[in-house]
Amino acid sequence: MSKQKGFSLIEIMVVVVIVGILAAVAIPNYQNYVVKGNRAAAQAFMVDVANREKQYLLDARIYAADLATLGMTAPTDVSKHYTVAICINPDSSQCTTAATPPYFIVTATPTGPGQTSDGALTLTSDGTKGPSGKW
């Protein structure tokens, strides 16, 4: 009598079900970590912009209106997922709060797929970070 080698259909179906359950748990968790990592990169860049703005204020006695004036560009890992803008004019559409001049608001608006549910991040000249719970 010869011995058959291989797997039965039931064994293969059990493995497929187990892999499906693991994937159903792992993929959403992985996506959350990716969103948090992208957010952390944007926050770090925003802090760099704020520091550069403060240095610029010492030299020019006014805050810079854009990243180009500061000699900065958003890194690729930030620009893929966020649009970073600086607001120094209270009539600008990027300004979400009014403050006494001189001031600036750095806003990172999510653009990439999956990142849009994260919401916009803001950092003001007085160090206020928004929205709370995201920093």
Image (tube, grey):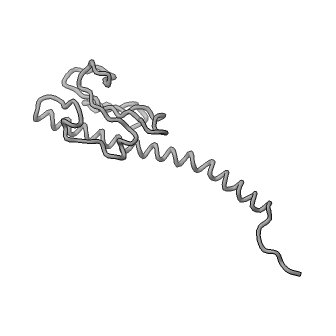
- Where the C terminus falls, by quadrant? top left
Q: Nearer the viewer, residue 119 or 127?
A: 119
Task: Give the residue furthest to the bottom.
Answer: 1
**Location of residue 90 with respect to 129 vertically, above or below:** above
Q: Position of residue 69 (x, y in %)?
A: 18, 35
Residue at 12%, 34% in the rendered image: 58
**Location of residue 101 with respect to 109 vertically, above or below:** above
Relative to 11, is 50 on the left or the right? left
Q: Position of residue 92 (x, y in %)?
A: 28, 21
The quarter of the displayed image where residue 133 is located: top left
Q: Position of residue 44 (x, y in %)?
A: 32, 43
Q: Position of residue 20 (x, y in %)?
A: 67, 52
Residue at 28%, 33% in the rendered image: 127
Residue at 24%, 36% in the rendered image: 67
Residue at 71%, 59% in the rendered image: 15
**Location of residue 67 with respect to 100 vertically, above or below:** below
- Where the N terminus falls, by quadrant? bottom right
Task: Give the residue furthest to the right.
Answer: 1
The quarter of the displayed image where residue 82 is located: top left
Relative to 115, is 59 on the left or the right? left
Q: Nearer the viewer, residue 98 or 89?
A: 89
